[in-house]
Amino acid sequence: MLEAIKLKGRIHPDRRLELPRLPPGLPEGEVELILLYERKPTTEDRAPLSPLAWPVLDGGQYLGGTLRREELYDDDGR
């Protein structure tokens, strides 16, 4: 059976992870750590592409008209 505890730690500028003193009663053995952190936006993060700037296809002769399946694929519609 797995159990979980929540600890707060700190990552120092030298990339060293500091954790508080562990509570008593934890058994010896392997553990798994999941780090949750706040990611600060950087100048490299780009804004999402506006739908107005999405690529478009030229409708050609179909602009303003109807477009049937047979016109796209073949006489049998496949």
Image (cartoon, rainbow, N blue to C red):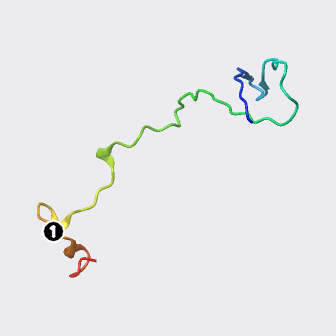
The residue pinned by badge 1 equals 61
Instruction: Write the residue at 69% across / 33% down.
Output: 34
Q: Is 32 or 61 nearer to us in this picture? A: 32
The residue lying furthest to the right in this view is 28
For residue 73, which quarter of the picture?
A: bottom left
Of the residues shown, which amino acid type is indicated by label 1?
Gln
Where residue 49 sits in the image (x, y, percent)?
A: 38, 43
Residue that appears at 72% across and 24% down: 5
Residue 27 or residue 1, whichever sits in front: 1
User: Is 34 displayed left or right of 78 in the figure?
Assistant: right
Q: Which of the 4 image quadrants contains residue 48? A: top left
Quadrant of the rendering where the C terminus is positioned: bottom left
- In the picture shown, does residue 67 fall above or below 15? below
Indicate the secondary structure of the residue bearing disc 1: helix
The quarter of the picture where the N terminus appears is top right
Q: Nearer the viewer, residue 6 or 65?
A: 6
